[in-house]
Image: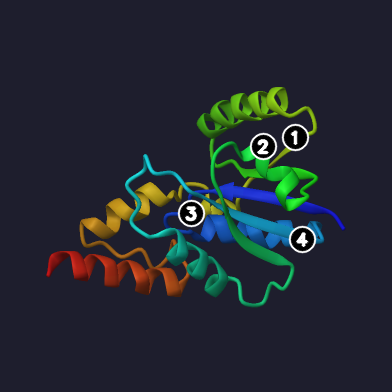
C-alpha cells in the first residue's frame, strides 16, 4: 500500500487543500492528512476542530486518514509508514520555501521524498491566512472554503464579536 503524508496547519482547510487531498487520493492508496501541532501559531481553530473540518469536507474519500503530528515532520514518515510527503504549491514564492524545506527534510532523513502538487488555477491564490483576514473584516469566504468551514468560520467570528 502506497501512503503519502500531507502535512500542514490547515487553519482553516481551504478548497485548495481539498483539491490537493482529492487528487492525491486518486494517486495513492492512502493519504494521511497530518495537522501540525504548533504552539507558536495563534490558531483560529483547535487541532480537533481542524481534524473534524477536514473529515467533514471529504466524506466521500475513504482512503484518507486525518491525524496530527508534533515536532519534525520527517519523524512522522515512519509513524504513518508514508513513502513520500506531498506539498501544495501556489506560486513561485511557495516553491522557494518548499524547495529549501524538501532539501532540509531529505538531509534529516534520506528516505524523505517530497512531491509537489499545484492546486487547480481556481485556488492558486487562496491561503488560510487570507481566508481569516477576509472573514475577520466581515467579507464572504464562501468561494474559497467548503461549506462546513464557512459555517465554522462564521460561528468563530460571530462568537468573537459577542
Cα separation, mark 3 vs mark 1, equals 22 Å
Ranked by sequence position, the earlier of labels 3 and 2 is: 3
Name the element at disc 1.
Answer: loop
Residue 30: x and y in percent read 77, 60
Residue 135 is situated, as x and y percent measured from the top left of the image, at: 28, 60
- Cα distance, mark 1 to mark 4? 17 Å
**Is any atom of residue 98 visible in this view?**
yes
Q: Give residue 30's mark.
A: 4
Q: Is residue 109 left or right of residue 149?
A: right
- CB under 8 Å between discs 4 and 2: no
Distance (Cα) linking label 4 and label 2: 18 Å
Structural distance between the alpha carbons of marks 4 and 3: 19 Å
Residue occupied by mark 3: 10
Res. 85 in view: no
Which residue was labeled with disc 1? 112
Whether residues under marks 2 and 1 lie with C-beta atoms below 8 angstroms apart, the answer is yes
Amino acid at each position: 500500500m502506497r501512503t503519502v503524508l500531507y502535512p500542514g496547519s490547515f487553519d482553516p482547510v481551504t478548497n485548495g487543500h481539498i483539491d490537493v487531498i482529492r487528487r492525491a487520493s486518486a494517486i495513492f492508496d492512502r493519504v494521511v492528512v497530518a495537522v501540525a501541532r504548533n504552539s507558536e501559531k495563534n490558531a483560529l481553530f483547535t487541532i480537533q476542530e481542524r481534524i473534524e473540518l477536514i473529515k467533514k469536507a471529504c466524506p466521500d474519500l475513504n482512503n484518507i486518514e486525518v491525524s496530527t503530528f508534533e515536532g519534525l515532520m520527517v519523524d512522522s514518515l515512519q509513524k504513518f509508514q508514508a513513502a513520500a510527503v506531498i506539498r501544495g504549491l501556489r506560486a513561485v514564492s511557495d516553491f522557494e520555501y518548499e524547495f529549501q524545506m524538501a532539501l532540509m527534510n531529505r538531509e534529516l532523513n534520506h528516505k524523505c521524498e517530497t512531491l509537489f502538487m499545484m492546486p487547480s488555477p481556481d485556488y492558486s491564490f487562496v491561503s488560510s491566512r487570507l481566508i481569516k483576514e477576509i472573514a475577520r473584516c466581515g467579507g464572504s469566504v464562501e468561494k474559497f472554503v467548503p461549506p462546513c468551514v464557512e459555517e465554522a468560520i462564521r460561528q468563530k467570528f460571530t462568537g468573537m464579536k459577542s
